[in-house]
Every structure is written in structure tokens, then in C-alpha cells.
Amino acid sequence: MWPYYPDLLATPVPRYTSFPTAAEFDGAVGPPHMAQALASVSADEAISLYLHIPYCSEICWYCGCNTGAANRTQRVQAYLLRLIEEIERVGKALGRRGRVRRIAWGGGSPNALDPDDFDTLMGRLGAAFRVDDPVLSVEIDPRGFDWRWAAALGRHGVTRVSLGVQTFDADIQAAIGRVQPVEMIACAVGQLRAAGVTSINVDLMYGLPLQTSAKLAATIDTALELGPDRLAVFGYAHVPHLIARQRRIDDSALPDPLARFGQAEFAHQRLTRAGYRPVGFDHFSLSGDALAIAAEEGRVRRNFQGFTEDPADILIGLGASAISRFPGWLLQNEKNAGRYHLRIANGQFATERGWVRSPNDQVIGNAIERLLCQGSATLTGVPDLPAIERRVAPYIAAGLAEWHDRRLVIPPRGLPYARTIAAALDPYRHRSAARFSSAI
């Protein structure tokens, strides 16, 4: 189904969860910019919140998230106190402007916390912000999930949960430092359903050490038996030069580029045959799920959580390393937990770097988002179109993209090249030394 052109996938590219990407963020952007961004929010504007919990009960070797071991209660509690201070500071700056329609919890693993801490933080959010019957989603590590946590999710009306699974293969689990029996994950799914969670996502990966298409097939079949409403199948990003814990993974056991490409294609075929609608290049959703409905109606967006039906233009990130998105700003909090503490303790916003988005940035970003989410984008008004046409030309010649006047279209056979085609619109990629993961 998918033609393989290794030369067109050779250059690593971003995942484009924002534009410009975090690789361009500048340390000249800081707390004053966050103050300006918050002041720009109008009275009834839709707002989404993201809370980052940078702790896990166990650290997986493949993981690129900003997280550490939750093995010191005092350290975790100190972080939560600062997080509450940040919640109150941001809420005060908004002054009840904006309506919070979505709240997402990620990490790390939010369930590395005690459920009582989740209760406390939810209460603080309700007090600090104008919360308007929000959709609540939480990322969960099946290891350490129990009935107490399920009850906490039920108390607060959490309807969406994403489970980190990656693989069910025992040998691969050992190779990536994430051992979790099938029975443990099935138990977590049962607890979530009993708690009223109506949309369960399962995260899987291809391109893992020791992985073959046969092993991936077995993992997908096991996942389907759990009846998830959504699945995300990500390519493992092996960047040990950036993430020290990945050095524990045996490079020689990783699939080669052709095998990796084949695994991505197999996952797409297997899940579409099973009745899941492809959303973007790595999400899949059952027809009745909100994400599939949004895809059918052309409403899918792209943000730091991936492909989403969240329509909000404003996403406020809370916690260490969390990124906020406003039409005119991208603002990232301090990554280091100690320095995050200091910024909050000194009465500042935690913003450590970011980007002031020019009108051109916004035009290009909107075009990249449409290209990745809807498979086409009209490039009228995008700056330097002749340069983009030159960069896209190899994909046009290979039949992986098409021009319809000034509308750039990615046909189904070009789907695995979506990120590299999108990169042709990105002027920063062509003068940046930043290193990224494999294009597929």
C-alpha cells in the first residue's frame, strides 16, 4: 500500500505538535510574555489546561518525557505545593476571564501521585479558574493503578483515559524497561470502565528493540481484545544523544529503517481492517468516538497531546516543562524541578523560554496543522511559496503529494511522508542544526 523511498525519509523531522517547534524556542522569552498572553484572553474564550506531573513509579528506558522517580514523598509533595501556587497565580492573572472546557493530566504518570493529591489539585483548579463542565482526560500507567485511583477518577467525572502500554511482548518489555503483564492492563481497563470512563486510548509503539511485524501483530491483537475506543501507534524515537536513559537500550536490536516502515504500514492496515478510523498519521478511533467524528467533519486539530478534537486556540500548561499555546505566543515552563521551584517561590510565572509568533508563523502553523490533520492545505498567503514548491518537488515526482492549484494534498499513499512534507513548509528546518527522531 505504501511505497518506500528511503531517501525521502532520511532527514529526521519534528512531530509538529506546535509551530514553531520547541527546537526554536528562545530564552529571551520569559515571565513578562506569559503575563501579556494571559492578559490577551477574552471574557468567554475557550481555554484548555494541561497539568504536568513529572514523576513515575518506575522509569522506562525508552521514555523521552520530563519525568523522574516518585521515590521520595517529600520531593513530590514540595512539587505539588509549587504547582498549587502556579495554579493560583495563573488563575489570578486571568481574573475569571476565559472558560476552561478541557483539563488534561499528563507526565510522567499522574497516578504516581496519591489519589488524595488528585482530589486536592482538582479542587484548586475549580477555585482558581472559571471551569465550565470540562472534558477531563488523564494519562495512566497501569503499574500502580488501583481501585482508589479508579474511584478518584469517577468522583471527578473523568471520561477519557490514555493507558501507556507500548507492547505486550515480554521480551520487548524487558528490553525497554517496562514490564507489565497483560492481566495488569486488563484489570486497569475493567476498573476504568467501572469508574465511568467512556473513552479509553491505548498507546502502542513500533520500531522497538527486538520487535518484528509478527510481534507487533500479536500486541495489536491483544490490545483489540481490550476494546479500546482509540489507539495511538507511535514510532519509537531513539535519541540517546538527547535522552540519557535510552542508552540502556541495545541499538543493535532496533529494527532497520525498512522493517520500521513495514511495521508502521502493518499497524495502519490491521487497525483500519478492525474498524478503526485513521486520524492523522498515528491515531486510530472507533466510529462513535469523538475523535473519529471530528475527523469525519474536518475538525481535528494538533496540539502537544497529539491529534485532538479540542477546538480551543488557548492551551495553558501548568507544571515543570509544560508548554502553553496562545495565538501570539508559545511559552514553556522551566524544565528543571529545582529551578521551577525557585521561579514560583520568587513570585514569578514559571516561563523559561518560548517564541513570539509572528503573523507569518501563524499562517505557516495553520497550514502545517491542516496538512497533518486533514491531508491538504491551501497555501495562498504562505510566505516564500516558490521555495516550498522546490522542497516539495521530490514528493510530487514520487506521487506522494499533489498540487491542486495552490492547495497541497497528501494522498493516502503519501501518509507516511506527512511529517517530511510538512517540514517543507517550515523555514526554520532549513537553517537549524536541531536533531530530531526518525521521520516514521
Image (cartoon, rainbow, N blue to C red):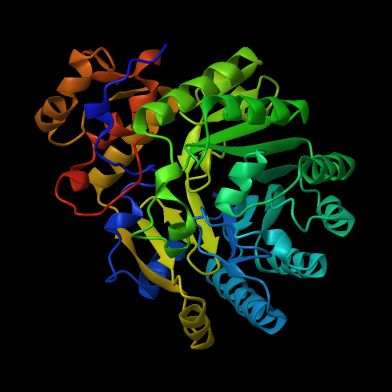
Residue 13 visible in the shown view: yes
Name the residue at 85% across, 43% down: 187
Q: Which residue is pictured at 76% across the width and 66% down the height?
A: 123
Residue 12 drawn above or below residue 387: below
In the image, taking residue 341 as reference, residue 254 lies left or right, namely left
Which quadrant: the C terminus?
Answer: top left
Q: Quadrant of residue 257?
A: top left
| Front-most of residues 137 and 60 | 60
Quarter of the rendering containing residue 319: bottom right
> At x 81% / y 53%, what residue is drawn?
153
Q: Of residues 426 and 100, which is closer to you in this image?
A: 426
| Position of 247 relative to 121 (above/below) | above
Q: Is residue 411 visible?
A: no
Say if 172 sits above or below 265 in the image: below
In the drawing, does residue 320 fall left or right of residue 162? left
Q: Residue 270 at x, y = what percent?
A: 59, 18
Nearer to the camera, 317 or 239: 239
The quadrant of the rendering that contains the N terminus is top left
Where residue 324 appears, as percent x and y from the top left, is: 46, 58
Q: Residue at x 51, y 52 (%)?
A: 62
Q: In this view, does 21 lie to the left or right of 271?
A: left
Residue 284 drawn at (x, y percent): 58, 27
Name the quadrant containing residue 388: top left
Direction from residue 399 to residue 333 in the image, left or right = right
Q: Where is residue 125 in the image (x, y as percent from the top left)?
A: 69, 65
397 up-or-down from 31: above or below: above
Q: So how many labels did they put on this image?
A: 0
